[in-house]
Image (tube, coloured by chain):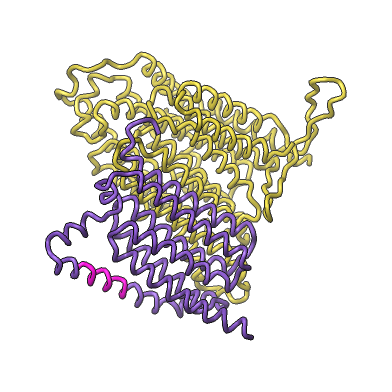
Chain colours: A purple, B yellow
């Protein structure tokens, strides 16, 4: 009984963690902060997963997420400062910052409002989701839907490699959380971890390739 | 020895080795081509589960290829019925590697094309099949570097491809495992369940069905046409294998009505919409992209034949279509890639007048595109005619929409021809047409005409192949 209470509290904490990290990722133009939020997001995903999966299986997803974050960091660190700003999609927001603090605040308010909209949509979809999958825990449902929703928003606002890959990793994390409610096999964990790592490697390729002058 | 070792692990290892030696492009290509041809020949000749009398020395026991291998808690299973698919996968690879010398693809093409074929073979083999969508996502991921040239800005179509496939395959995997945990009595009989609807959306994302098709023309616009055509055809082949696996696992009663009718209408709709979009297009690369959408539609029509025909005939038609589509698309893509190399652009304004300088390339472009449009005496016509005539009695309006779509497509081809032959300063100066490219293109064009005029050659070959392979599986 005590274990169930701990797990329930952890899943609520995890849902709050993934929500706040996904919002921060949406708002922040800084790639370092985005990657920090991505690493924390994987911690949240891990806490959500332990509701359904044994800890060692959940750890594979956590470690693959953290390794992916490091792979992306290595990729973007290999670029010059200007290229880093361009690839991380920070140029639009930095332009706003240079034009005046009030415009920057406005852009943050805009992103927060869209995140709020994403939250409302998630809240309205949650009963439908639990109707389709009755065995689904509410915190897991919320966590997965908010990751998918805010990940889509991030994808919608970006046309640069780094934010696209981070957004896609967020969306796929959301799907992974839902998938773990139905399958807890070793192969599922292995394939999900491999997907995350390969996507990060491809992301690294996409970030660095435009600046490569020699044969890849 | 295991079949999985031969057709999945070995090509995977070859792909990794070729990747590390990619700077020696010619050597890598020759080794890759030889390995692809060898795997094709193995798929054709080596029975799975039967003793094979290869005696290199006295006392060597007869070889026997086992059909399954267990990795973690899943099985990879390749039996004799899947040999025809393995043959299609590796013949397709060998065919496209054959044109790499002329098309100037990037150095990653050969190793990654090999890797993608190995993963497609894994998609066919993996059991339980609900893991197959995740394997398909690996195919998409490995295709991304093929589509991105070093030193150039990443095409937005590549981002869309990555996003659509990431979302589509994740959703499909979720729906597959979720459907296993739902009791059949809770599924409503008269209305489609949310799981069915979400599965359809996921399939539409992976198969690039309208309105999720936008990544295809966006990629075709900016990428080397030969590279993009290989990715489009190989990826659509993998996605259709996945669809085939999903259909084969659904209950017969569900397949017979809703799924098949849906596939047939969807197929014709894709041909129709691709024709409309192509005829107003001003970029030859994007027109090639719309041709890919149209061809996926025809492949869906072939799958729709599943109800009225036996599996051997269906496989035969699918293989014959695969041959004619690959041939026509390769000739078109090779010709367009020759023109693409002049200005790194396939818009009409940049291609104007190039027809006077590259007559073989223009002839290849037009003949390849008209063959895909299903014009008589060209390679695609006999197969498409056979498919459509099978449906004309049951779905009377379908041939009409198919014809309108293709007439619009032919119109787009002629618009391209007019711009290529129009007078322009693009036609002056520069290097003339390469003789080797002209020979390759001419051979492709002659083959298109021969298969259009004598389709029985190809059909007989395919039927013999199927009969020989199915005889072994029945004997087992």
Of the 4 image quadrants, the one containing the C terminus of chain B is: top right
Q: Position of residue B249 (x, y in %)?
A: 62, 57
- Is residue A105 left or right of B114 when viewed as pictured? left
Q: Quadrant of residue B218?
A: top left
Q: Residue furthest left?
A: A99
Residue A115 included in the magenta stretch of the image: yes
Q: Position of residue B16 (x, y in %)?
A: 54, 35
One can see residue B448 in this view: no
Of the 4 image quadrants, the one containing the N terminus of chain B is: top right
Q: Read off the magenta span.
A: A107-117
Closer to the camera, B9 or B384? B9
Closer to the camera, B408 or B109? B109
Residue A39 included in the magenta stretch of the image: no
Identified at 59% across, 52% down, the residue is: B245
Q: Position of residue B129 (x, y in %)?
A: 62, 55
Q: Position of residue A211 (x, y in %)?
A: 31, 39
Q: Quadrant of residue B31?
A: top right
Q: Residue furthest top?
A: B435
Above or below, A209 against A115 in this view is above
Above or below, B69 against B338 in this view is below
Q: Main secondary structure of the magenta part?
A: helix
Q: Residue furthest right?
A: B59
One can see residue B18 in this view: yes
Q: Total marks drawn? A: 0
Identified at 84% across, 29% down, the residue is: B61
Closer to the camera, B400 or A174? A174
Above or below, B310 against B199 in this view is above
Identified at 52% across, 32% down, the residue is: B93
- Is residue B135 left or right of A36 when viewed as pictured? right
């Amino acid at each position: 009984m005590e274990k169930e209470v701990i797990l329930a509290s952890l899943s609520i904490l995890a849902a709050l963690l993934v929500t706040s990290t996904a919002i921060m990722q949406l708002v922040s133009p800084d790639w370092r902060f985005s990657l920090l939020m991505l690493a924390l997001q994987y911690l949240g995903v891990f806490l959500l997963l332990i509701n359904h999966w044994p800890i060692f299986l959940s750890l594979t997803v956590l470690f693959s997420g953290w390794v992916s974050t490091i792979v992306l960091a290595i990729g973007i660190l290999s670029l010059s400062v200007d290229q880093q700003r361009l690839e991380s999609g920070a140029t639009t927001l930095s332009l706003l910052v240079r034009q005046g603090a009030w415009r920057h605040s406005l852009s943050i308010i805009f992103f927060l409002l869209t995140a709020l909209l994403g939250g409302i949509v998630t809240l309205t979809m949650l009963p439908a989701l639990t109707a389709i999958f009755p065995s689904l825990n509410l915190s897991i449902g919320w966590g997965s839907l908010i990751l998918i929703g805010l990940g889509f928003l991030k994808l919608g606002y970006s046309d640069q490699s780094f934010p696209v890959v981070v957004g896609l990793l967020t969306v796929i994390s959301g799907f992974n959380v839902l998938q773990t409610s139905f399958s807890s096999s070793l192969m599922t964990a292995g394939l999900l971890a491999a997907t995350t790592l390969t996507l990060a490697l491809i992301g690294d390729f996409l970030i660095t390739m435009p600046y490569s002058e020699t044969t890849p | 020895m295991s079949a999985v070792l031969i057709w999945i692990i070995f090509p995977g290892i070859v792909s990794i080795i070729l990747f590390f030696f990619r700077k020696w492009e010619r050597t890598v290509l020759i080794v890759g081509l030889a390995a692809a041809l060898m795997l094709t020949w193995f798929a054709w000749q080596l029975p799975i589960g039967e003793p094979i009398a290869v005696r290199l020395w006295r006392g060597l026991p007869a070889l026997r290829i086992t059909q399954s291998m267990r990795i973690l808690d899943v099985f990879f299973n390749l039996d004799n019925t899947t040999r025809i698919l393995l043959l299609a996968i590796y013949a397709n690879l060998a065919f496209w590697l054959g044109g790499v010398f002329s098309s100037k693809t990037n150095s990653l093409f050969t190793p990654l094309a090999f890797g993608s074929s190995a993963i497609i073979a894994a998609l066919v083999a993996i059991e339980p099949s609900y893991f197959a969508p995740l394997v398909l996502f690996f195919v998409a991921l490995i295709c991304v570097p093929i589509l991105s040239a070093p030193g150039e800005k990443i095409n937005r179509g590549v981002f869309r491809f990555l996003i659509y496939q990431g979302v589509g395959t994740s959703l499909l995997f979720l729906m597959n495992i979720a459907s296993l945990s739902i009791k059949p009595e809770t599924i409503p009989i008269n209305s489609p369940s949310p799981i069915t609807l979400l599965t359809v959306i996921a399939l539409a994302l992976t198969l690039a069905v309208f309105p999720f098709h936008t990544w295809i023309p966006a990629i075709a616009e900016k990428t080397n046409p030969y590279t993009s055509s290989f990715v489009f055809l190989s990826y659509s082949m993998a996605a259709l294998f996945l669809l085939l696996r999903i259909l084969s696992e659904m209950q017969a009663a569900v397949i017979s009505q809703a799924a098949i009718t849906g596939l047939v209408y969807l197929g014709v709709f894709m041909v129709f919409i691709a024709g409309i979009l192509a005829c107003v297009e001003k970029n030859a690369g994007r027109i090639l992209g719309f041709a890919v959408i149209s061809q996926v539609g025809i492949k869906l029509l072939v799958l729709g034949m599943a109800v009225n025909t036996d599996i051997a005939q269906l496989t035969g038609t699918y293989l014959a279509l695969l041959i004619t589509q690959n041939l026509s698309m390769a000739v078109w893509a090779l010709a367009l890639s020759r023109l693409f190399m002049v200005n790194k652009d396939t818009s009409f304004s940049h291609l104007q007048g190039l027809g006077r300088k590259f007559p073989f390339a223009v002839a290849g472009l037009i003949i390849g595109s008209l063959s895909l449009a299903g014009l008589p005496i060209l390679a695609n016509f006999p197969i498409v005619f056979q498919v459509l005539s099978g449906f004309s009695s049951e779905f009377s309006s379908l041939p009409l929409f198919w014809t309108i779509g293709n007439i619009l497509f032919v119109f787009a081809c002629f618009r391209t021809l007019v711009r290529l032959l129009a007078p322009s300063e693009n036609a002056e100066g520069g290097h003339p047409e390469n003789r080797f490219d002209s020979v390759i293109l001419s051979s492709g064009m002659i083959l298109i005409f021969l298969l259009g005029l004598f389709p029985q050659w190809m059909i007989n070959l395919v039927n013999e192949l199927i009969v020989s392979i199915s005889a072994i599986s029945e004997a087992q």
